[in-house]
Amino acid sequence: MNKSSIIKNTEQFKLDDSGSYDSCVADYHQCVNRLCEPFVKQMVAIAHLKQGQRVLDVGTGTGIVANYAAKLLDNSGSVIGIDLSEGMLKTARLNAKNMGISNVDFLRMDAEDLDLPTESFDSVISMYAIDHFPNAAQALGEMHRVLKPEGHIVISIGSRTPPWGAGRFIAYCVGINRKIKQLFQPHLYAPNFIQSMMNNHLGHLPSPSHSNWGGGKPENSLLRIIQETGFHVKDMLWNHNMITMQSTEEFWRSQTAIVTEVRKRLQNIEPNAKRSFLEDFKKITKKALSHGGRLYYCGAVFMICAIRK
Ligand SMILES: C[S@@+](CC[C@H](N)C(=O)[O-])C[C@H]1O[C@@H](n2cnc3c(N)ncnc32)[C@H](O)[C@@H]1O
């Protein structure tokens, strides 16, 4: 493949990836709002925002981080949220309006090519987005450029088990606890549930590679590229939670909106195959509920806070 077709594929990948959210923005927002509030608060807390500061949220989605930070700055400072998905940006703007927030702007922009002045932000935050950028190192380079010296960057990725430290032991205990519960009650846990169901029904496919940071543990890769970009790592945290889904419909909508490989795959299969997949999904979840089981969504996050030297 020559260089121009790689670039064209990369640009097409970005449009397809961000465009894949457009048809499920409302479901995405509802679930992220319920699941991620503690993670958002934790990310913003470790960014140590101060009154009067300027903050950038990269891959802002429906603006959950940007709107929270803007509210915290309370008009003394300002926030810009950038994203490539028009659907996400429209909802982010509406959310800001409904929350009465006026010190936030949402702009359509590529994370790998920020149309923003050098050294113009005190903090850059990016939640669950960096592994969507084909060239994550390029995006981090841009975040480094727009940050002021000594500014904070906080980046998070989804991470079911932390790669090291006490968090690994906690995750192990959580897993055992879940397995014991399943012996007595047929609980179902997202997002593992839909992923394994999809593999069983439609055949196993390797997850599409989002970025070029290579194989291995994404947490290690994130740490490496943050350091290689010239940031000084200050904090690394892992967190998790579990929320009860109120219905089979919510269990379906949340997973098909949030889990990228599932969302993209379902958008590309025959309508009949999708219908029969949904029917089986309903059958299994209804059976679990009628036997006293519950439907849970398990969220987990790994975040790194670093300083621009
Ligand atoms: C998993 S969502 C995270 C959204 C939000 N940060 C949150 O936590 O709810 C990933 C977001 O990255 C956006 N995105 C993907 N590629 C992008 C790019 N090259 N530049 C900017 N945003 C991008 C998507 O449109 C999507 O809104």
Image: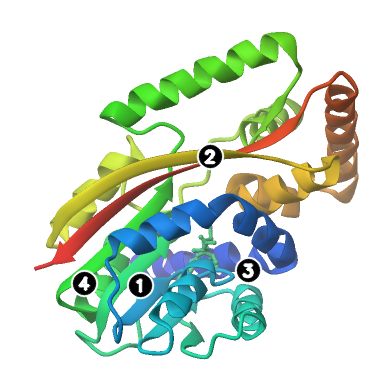
- The residue at which mark 2 appears reads as 241
Q: How many marks are shown on the rendered structure?
A: 4
Q: Is the residue under label 2 in contact with that under label 3 (CB below 8 Å)?
A: no
Q: Amino acid at mark 3?
A: Gly
In the rendered structure, which disc, 3 or 4, sits on the residue that comes first in sequence? 3
On screen, residue 229 versus residue 242, left or right, reads: left
- The residue at which mark 4 appears reads as 144
Q: Is the residue under label 1 in contact with that under label 2 (CB below 8 Å)?
A: no
Q: Residues within 10 Å of mark 4 (few under 14, many from 20)?
A: many
3 or 4: mark nearer the eye: 4
Confirm or reject: label 3 Cβ below 8 Å from ligand 1.
yes
Q: CA distance from mark 1 to mark 4?
A: 11 Å
Query: In terms of secondary structure, where does tag 2 sit?
Result: strand
In the rendered structure, which disc, 3 or 2, sits on the residue that comes first in sequence? 3
1 or 4: mark nearer the eye: 4
Q: Is the residue under label 2 in contact with that under label 4 (CB below 8 Å)?
A: no
Pick the front one: 88 or 178: 178
Q: CA distance from mark 4 to mark 2?
A: 31 Å
In the rendered structure, which disc, 4 or 2, sits on the residue that comes first in sequence? 4
Residue 145 position, x and y percent, is 20, 78
Label annotation for residue 19: 3
Q: Could you tell me if residue 226 is visible in this image?
A: yes
Confirm or reject: label 1 Cβ below 8 Å from ligand 1.
yes
2 or 1: mark nearer the eye: 2
Q: Amino acid at mark 1?
A: Glu
Residue 146 in which image quadrant: bottom left
Query: In terms of secondary structure, where does tag 4 sit?
Result: helix
Q: Residues within 10 Å of mark 2 (few under 14, many from 20)?
A: some
- The residue at which mark 1 appears reads as 112
Q: CA distance from mark 3 to mark 4?
A: 26 Å
Residue 48 position, x and y percent, is 27, 67
In the rendered structure, which disc, 1 or 3, sits on the residue that comes first in sequence? 3
